[in-house]
Amino acid sequence: MTKRQENAKKTKLKLVKTALELFKDTGFYDINVEDITKKAGVSKGTFYTYFKRKEDIVLEISRAPFSEIAEELDLMKDKDIIEKLTYYFRRFMECVEFSGIHICRQWTRDVLDPNNVPENKDSQKWDYDFEMLRTILENAVLGKELKSDTPIELLTHIFICELYGMMTCWCMSDGKFEPLQWTEQFCNMQLENILKPYLT
């Protein structure tokens, strides 16, 4: 990577981090591009080099941490399937909570109807999350932690519905429902029970 490319990457990251801070503090709709660029110390023209509008930053915020989770899971060779899924659930919800309820609401609005997702929005997030969960389970079957007849599709749907349900409850309760806390409870109380019939 050239020095220019490194600087461009740093500038884009700075804009994303600044926008995230502002959205968390003030809310998505009360912040404009000028607020973001002023706090980041860059020109409005620089903003438009990377994004067409402020809504496009939500895509960056919603995807970037999850690729990190995938890399972290790849390094967990010595962990069993319960530990890996618990880790995934916790990290997933940490990322959601860290981004803040305003980002969660905006992202949900943008992708609720996958057939009418605005341009440059994350219409594939469901598929991305579903595939990551399914891969964790498939790898457990290949590693003989789970039986070969484990209903992977069914379990993946159960798990993704649990995660997305917690996000929705957080938004609808106006922050009274604490997703990370409930994720911990789900993992402690239900995860092993759900997988128990399929463990080898």
Image (cartoon, grey):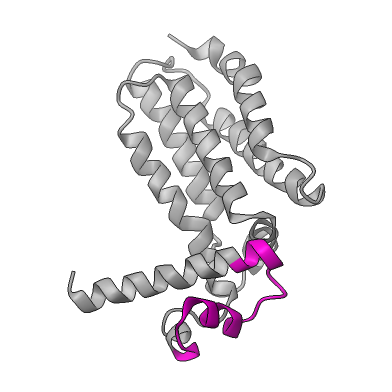
Q: Which residues are magenta?
A: 22-45
Residue 157 % position (x, y): 60, 35
Quadrant position of the C terminus in the picture = top left
Q: Residue at x 74, y 46 (%)?
A: 170
Residue 62 % position (x, y): 53, 57
Q: From the viewer's side, name the closer residue of 148 and 145.
A: 145
Residue 29 % position (x, y): 72, 73
Left or right of residue 21, residue 175 in this image = right
Q: Answer yes or no: is residue 89 visible.
A: yes
Q: Residue at x 68, y 46 (%)?
A: 167
User: Measured along the vertical axis of the image, is residue 1 above or below residue 169?
Assistant: below
Left or right of residue 146, residue 123 in this image = right
* Magenta-span inclusion, residue 107: no
Quadrant position of the N terminus in the picture = bottom left
Residue 195 % position (x, y): 55, 17
Dominant secondary structure, magenta = helix
Q: From the viewer's side, name the closer residue of 132 and 48.
A: 48
